[in-house]
């Protein structure tokens, strides 16, 4: 199977996670940072080291996608107006096409979640889904198109490879090493030039000219953790931290869409809400 561009599918869960997390803007309570300090932290600033780090970061998406599938955990923390709330998820993801199966816990409630062919399906707690059906459906591509890609392109699996193109040598700093789930990793901090991303001019109006991103790569150059921090300027100014961790490469993924008769399509409602916030 040709792998050119398949790394662009890394991070499929992040779209769904941000959607789940941003509805928690009005949640209460404080939450600690998702990613802890690195072990043996040291910055490496030489030109040669930066170039080596840049090459490692740029190739990481494709190297991870070569594993086809993985187990993933997700944490999205959304903070606004002095309050914060967290959504946690765990499941499996197809790193090639972006399909996934997850369980998300937010505000003490569990939501079954699937992404199939770039469509998000969520099953809220019984009796809470609109339309009297157990599942809701959100077409992620349609929402992104209607919002001019908006903040979602930051976490869109179809745009993840664009991060690599938006990073140059001066943007990469080696921050040391960490052990994640027993695996030795090297941490890199990068700055993403938003203008170089697809729809960058519109996106920069919402999240600013640059985004900080941290990547933890294992000795095979695969992503074990990715952290993106953004401040979204909408009706309510909110900061969103999204942390993905990958493990158990090669695990089975069984992502199937629910029966159509059990699904209420919420794509239009989500699109309208996004335009109103913009």
Image (cartoon, rainbow, N blue to C red):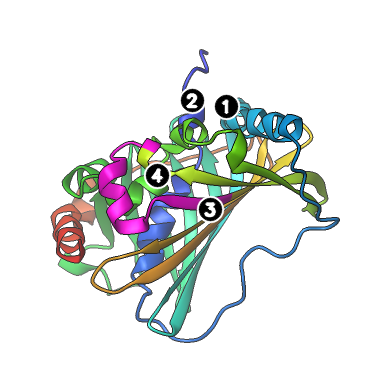
Q: Which residues are magenta?
A: 196-213
* Above/below status of 72 relative to 104: above
From this viewpoint, is residue 31 visible?
A: yes
Dot label at residue 6: 2
Q: Please give left or right for residue 221 compared with residue 13 in the image.
A: right
Front label number (3 vs 2): 3
Q: Are marks 1 and 2 in contact (CB under 8 Å)?
A: yes
Check residue 67 for magenta coloring. no
Distance between mark 1 and mark 2 Cα atoms: 6 Å
The residue wearing badge 4 is 194
Distance between mark 4 and mark 2 Cα atoms: 21 Å
Dot label at residue 212: 3
Distance between mark 3 and mark 1 Cα atoms: 21 Å
Check residue 209 for magenta coloring. yes
Q: Please give left or right for residue 51 compared with residue 258 in the image.
A: right
Which quadrant, please, contains the C terminus?
bottom left
Dot label at residue 62: 1
Question: Which numbered disc flags the more N-terminal residue, 4 or 3?
Answer: 4
Distance between mark 3 and mark 2 Cα atoms: 23 Å
Question: Residue 233: x percent and y percent?
Answer: 30, 65
């Amino acid at each position: 199977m040709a792998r050119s561009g398949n790394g662009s599918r890394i991070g499929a869960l992040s779209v769904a996670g941000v959607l789940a997390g941003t509805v928690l803007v009005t949640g209460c309570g404080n939450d600690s940072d998702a990613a802890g300090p690195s072990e043996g932290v040291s910055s490496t600033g030489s030109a040669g080291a930066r170039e080596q780090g840049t090459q490692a970061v740029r190739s990481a998406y494709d190297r991870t996608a070569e594993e086809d599938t993985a187990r993933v955990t997700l944490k999205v923390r959304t903070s606004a107006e002095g309050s914060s709330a967290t959504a946690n998820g765990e499941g499996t993801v197809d790193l090639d096409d972006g399909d996934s199966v997850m369980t998300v816990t937010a505000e003490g409630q569990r939501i079954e979640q699937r992404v199939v062919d770039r469509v998000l399906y969520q099953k809220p707690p019984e009796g809470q889904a609109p339309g009297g059906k157990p599942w809701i459906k959100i077409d992620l591509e349609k929402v992104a198109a209607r919002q001019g890609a908006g903040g979602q392109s930051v976490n869109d699996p179809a745009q993840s490879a664009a991060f690599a193109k938006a990073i140059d040598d001066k943007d990469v700093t080696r921050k040391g090493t960490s052990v994640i789930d027993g695996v030795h990793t090297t941490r890199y901090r990068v700055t993403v030039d938003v203008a170089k991303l697809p729809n960058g001019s519109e996106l920069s109006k919402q999240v600013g000219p640059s985004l900080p991103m941290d990547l933890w790569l294992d000795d095979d150059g695969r992503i074990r953790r990715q952290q993106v921090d953004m401040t979204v300027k909408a009706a309510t100014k909110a900061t969103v931290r999204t942390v993905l961790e990958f493990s158990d490469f090669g695990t089975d993924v069984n992502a199937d869409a629910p029966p159509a008769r059990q699904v209420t399509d919420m794509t239009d409602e989500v699109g309208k809400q996004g335009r109103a916030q913009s």
